[in-house]
Amino acid sequence: MKFIFGLMLCYTLMACQSTVVKAENTVSAAESLGFSSERLDRIATVMQTYIDRGKLAGTLTLVAKDGKIAYLNAQGMQDKAAGIPMSEDTIFRIYSMSKPVTAVAAMTLWEQGKFHMFDPISKYLPEFTNMKVYVSGSGDDMVLEDAKSPIRIIDLFMHTSGLSYGFTGSEVDKMYQQMQAKPDELNRSNILSKIAAIPLVHQPGSAWNYGVSTDIIGFLIEKLSGQKLGDYMQQTIFSPLGMKDTGFYVTPDKVARLTQIYTADRKTGKTIVMQNEPLGDYKSDPEIHNAGGGLVSTMQDYFTFAQMMLNGGEINGVRILGRKTVEYMTSNHMPQNLIPFNSSSQGEGFGLAMSVTVDPGMSGFMSSKGNFGWGGMASTYFRVDPEEKIVLISMAQFVPIGFHRYHDDFRNLVYQALVD
């Protein structure tokens, strides 16, 4: 079995029986929502530049305001070699954009009193009792100390748990890499104990470190619901919202809509097809549903999810969360001394499984205070702006996100088009 926690980076458009209205891509439609259609067209120009230069195979971009789509454009190819163009119903590996979905699933249980934010995770998953924290050294000379406090559930939401991913050359991350190198030895019965045996990179609650925290929330959901994660999400989120193409794998009748995934050749820097893509081929139901990065989705499905969040937990008469729950999720929970949560996210605090803009002037992007969202390893990206009532989503399939910073351009291109 492939190791499900490997390689995740942080950093309708059909109606789905929906009352979210898709505005026609005309001058009057865009301008009725407060945009300049001429300025919105700059999005297509910039995205096409990335495609023409061979950096991205294709893009799908969406801008919505007040629940209506002001701009939607598929450009380039879903699969270059096969000659399949990008389309509005293309299916994408959204990787870490799974995290907000997992957070919503967990919060449906929180609303029922199934857990409290400051509960130690060991109360529900005893493997995480008596954790050790890395101090210095390596191998047999590694120095560890006892965790001064338990990992709280809110630490998992905020990535302040001390858990890691294995992305760096640190001594702790080398241990994650060693675990990942033996995927056949990992399964549902031992994965938590193997992760818990690796020391934390810092004392719980003392710093921000991107890691398998959201994945552990997935196991918490399964423990409290008595269901496999995907089944619980299907019951509480996907079916109620009509998110018919979102899940942990692609069924055979939909495989033709799944994008090819690309990366950069290490020697030439040119865009090539990615071999051995993270988390497998997504064509069969995995043994473990990866809560932190295992979902696939479409633009329509994720737009429905994001608009639900913007609406305060409800869309089309279907309520997933209470309004105050969404406010809690999308508020900054990061203490002042940990803002920004990392050096590349100036002006950003952190809510539950998403970053939250606390100082637009420091962010380097046009934005609003309270703007929230996240991205996925294969260059998927979304933000929700409650002040402007905007949802913006960009989808591509290039690993890693940030190698070509098209989503930064996209974000500014959206805001520069506002003229109301």
Image (spheres, rainbow, N blue to C red):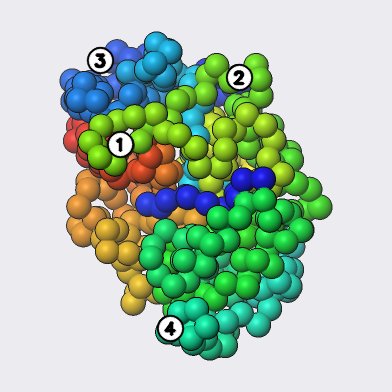
Residue underneath mark 3: 27
Under mark 1, the amino acid is Asp
| Mark 1 vs 3, N-terminal side | 3
Location of the C terminus by quadrant is top left
**Contact (Cβ within 8 Å) of mark 4 with mark 3:** no
The image quadrant of residue 18 is: top right
Q: Foreground residue, 147 or 366?
A: 147
Residue underneath mark 4: 137
| Residue 103: percent from left, percent from top | 58, 53
10 Å neighbourhood of mark 2: few (<14), some, or many (≥20)?
A: few
| Above or below, 366 relative to 24 | below
Q: Secondary structure at mark 1?
A: loop
Viewed as shown, does residue 189 lie left or right of 319? right
10 Å neighbourhood of mark 4: few (<14), some, or many (≥20)?
A: few
C-alpha gap between disc 3 and disc 2: 34 Å
Viewed as shown, does residue 121 lie left or right of 273? right
Q: Nearer the viewer, mark 4 or mark 3?
A: 4
Under mark 2, the amino acid is Lys
| Mark 4 vs 3, N-terminal side | 3
Residue underneath mark 2: 254
Q: Secondary structure at mark 4?
A: loop
C-alpha gap between disc 4 and disc 3: 63 Å
The image quadrant of residue 246 is: top right
C-alpha gap between disc 4 and disc 2: 49 Å
Residue drawn at x 57%, y 82% as measured from the top left: 132
The residue most toward the right is 226
Under mark 3, the amino acid is Val
| Residue 330: percent from left, percent from top | 46, 55
Q: Nearer the viewer, mark 4 or mark 2?
A: 4
Using the rendered image of the protein, determine whether residue 398 is visible from the camera's viewpoint.
yes
